[in-house]
Image (tube, rainbow, N blue to C red):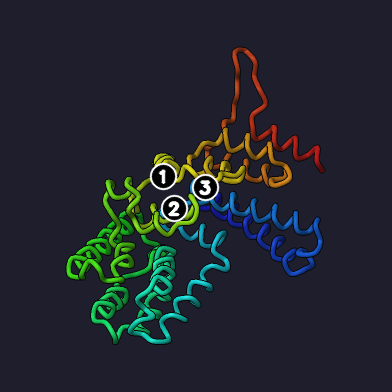
C-alpha cells in the first residue's frame, strides 16, 4: 500500500510538472493569464512535493528537505555561486581565493549539497595551500547527501554516515588555524552544538537568506537525526532567530506542512484559491487521506459531518 501511495503521489507530481513546463515553453512571460497559471502551478508543486516528503516518503527527511529546497528555490542561484567562486579562484589563486567573494559561494554550494562542485572549485587553488588540499582529500572520501539518498540508505545508515562525516570534519578543524578561511566550509560538514545553533553562530544561519533556507540547512547539517515529527520544534527555533523576516501566506502554508498541522494546511489552501485551485486541493487531500492523515468520520455532538475528503471531492465536482 505504501508503494502504491508513493507511485500515486509521484504520478500527480509528474503530471503537474509537465503542465508547468509546457506553459514555460510558451508565452507565459508576456501573457498575464499564463503567468498567473504558471505561478500557481509552481506553488502547488512546491507544496505537493513537500507534503510528499513529509507525509508519504520513508527516506531520511534531512536530505529530502534540502533537495526539495534546491529544486524550488535555487534554480538560478547555483550557477551564479559557481561563476562567482570560479571568477575569484581562476585569477591570482594566492589572494583571490582568500576573500568572501570566493568562500561565501563555496560555503553556499556546500550547504546545498553540491559537493562535487565545491571540490572542483577548491582544486583550482589547492596547490597554493596545504589545508585546502586536505579538505579536497576529505571531500573525495565522503559521499554527498544525495549520493546516500540515491543509494537507498536507510535512516540508520544515513545517521551513521553523517556522524562519521561530522567527526572527520571536526577533527580536521582542530588542526587548522582559527583564522584560516577554509574553516567555515569545514563547519558545514562538522555541524555545531545546540548552544551554538541557539546563539545563531552556525554557518547556515550566517549565509541563509530566508527561513526556509535556514531550516533546510539546519536539518541537513546540524540536526540530520531529527524525525519528521520534530520539525515543528526546529521550525519554531528558526522562526525565533529570524523575527524580522517578512512572512507571506505561502510561508504559512509551508509552516503547516512542516509542522504536520493538516487542519491548518487545508484551511489555508482553501482560503487561497488563486494560488491553490480546487483540483490541486482535492488531489492533495486524496494523498493525505490514503496516508492516514485525514479522518474518515467526523462527528460534532450528535451531528455527523461530511468527511474532509468527501467535502473536497464534492466541491471539486461543482467546479467542473
Q: Residue furthest left?
A: 175
Q: Are marks 2 and 1 in contact (CB under 8 Å)?
A: yes
Q: Residue at x 59, y 13 (%)?
A: 301
* Badge 3 or badge 2: first in the primary sequence: 3
Residue nearer the viewer, 206 or 46:
206
For marks 3 and 2, give the CA distance. 34 Å
Residue nearer the viewer, 94 or 219:
94
Residue nearer the viewer, 300 or 141:
141
For marks 2 and 1, give the CA distance. 10 Å
Task: Determine which residue is flagged by label 3.
Answer: 1
* Badge 3 or badge 1: first in the primary sequence: 3
Up-down relation of residue 25 to residue 221 (above or below): below
Q: Residues within 10 Å of mark 2 (few under 14, many from 20)?
A: many
Residue 162 left/right relative to 41:
left
- SS for tag 3? loop
Task: Determine which residue is flagged by label 1.
Answer: 241
- Which quadrant of the view contains residue 21? bottom right
For the C terminus, which image quadrant? top right
For marks 3 and 1, give the CA distance. 40 Å
Q: Residue at x 68, y 54 (%)?
A: 41
* Badge 2 or badge 1: first in the primary sequence: 2
Task: Determine which residue is flagged by label 2.
Answer: 214
Q: Residues within 10 Å of mark 1 (few under 14, many from 20)?
A: some
Up-down relation of residue 266 to residue 86 (above or below): above
Which tag is nearer the camera, tag 3 or tag 1? 1
Amino acid at each position: 500500500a505504501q508503494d502504491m501511495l508513493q507511485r500515486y503521489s509521484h504520478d500527480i507530481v509528474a503530471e503537474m510538472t509537465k503542465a508547468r513546463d509546457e506553459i514555460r515553453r510558451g508565452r507565459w512571460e508576456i501573457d498575464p493569464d499564463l503567468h498567473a497559471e504558471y505561478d500557481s502551478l509552481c506553488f502547488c508543486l512546491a507544496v505537493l512535493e513537500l507534503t510528499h516528503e513529509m507525509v508519504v516518503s520513508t527516506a531520511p527527511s534531512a536530505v529530502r528537505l534540502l533537495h526539495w529546497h534546491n529544486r524550488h528555490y535555487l534554480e538560478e542561484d547555483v550557477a551564479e555561486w559557481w561563476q562567482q567562486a570560479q571568477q575569484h579562484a581562476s585569477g591570482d589563486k594566492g589572494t583571490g581565493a582568500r576573500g568572501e567573494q570566493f568562500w561565501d559561494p563555496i560555503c553556499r554550494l556546500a550547504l546545498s549539497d553540491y559537493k562535487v562542485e565545491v571540490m572542483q572549485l577548491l582544486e583550482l587553488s589547492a596547490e597554493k595551500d596545504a589545508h585546502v588540499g586536505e579538505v579536497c582529500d576529505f571531500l573525495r572520501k565522503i559521499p554527498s547527501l544525495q549520493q546516500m539518498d540515491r543509494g537507498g540508505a536507510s535512516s540508520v545508515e544515513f545517521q551513521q554516515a553523517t556522524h562519521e562525516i561530522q567527526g572527520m570534519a571536526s577533527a580536521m578543524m582542530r588542526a587548522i588555524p582559527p583564522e584560516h578561511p577554509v574553516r567555515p566550509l569545514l563547519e558545514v560538514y562538522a555541524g555545531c552544538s545546540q548552544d551554538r545553533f541557539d546563539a545563531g553562530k552556525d554557518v547556515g544561519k550566517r549565509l541563509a537568506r530566508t527561513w526556509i533556507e535556514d531550516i533546510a540547512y539546519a536539518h541537513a547539517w546540524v540536526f540530520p537525526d531529527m524525525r519528521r515529527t520534530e520539525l515543528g520544534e526546529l521550525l519554531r527555533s528558526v522562526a525565533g532567530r529570524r523575527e524580522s523576516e517578512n512572512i507571506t501566506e505561502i510561508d504559512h502554508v509551508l509552516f503547516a506542512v512542516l509542522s504536520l498541522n493538516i487542519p491548518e494546511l487545508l484551511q489555508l489552501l482553501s482560503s487561497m484559491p488563486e494560488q491553490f485551485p480546487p483540483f490541486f486541493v482535492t488531489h492533495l487531500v486524496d494523498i493525505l487521506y490514503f496516508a492516514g492523515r485525514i479522518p474518515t468520520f467526523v462527528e460534532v455532538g450528535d451531528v455527523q459531518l461530511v468527511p474532509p475528503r468527501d467535502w473536497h471531492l464534492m466541491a471539486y465536482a461543482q467546479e467542473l
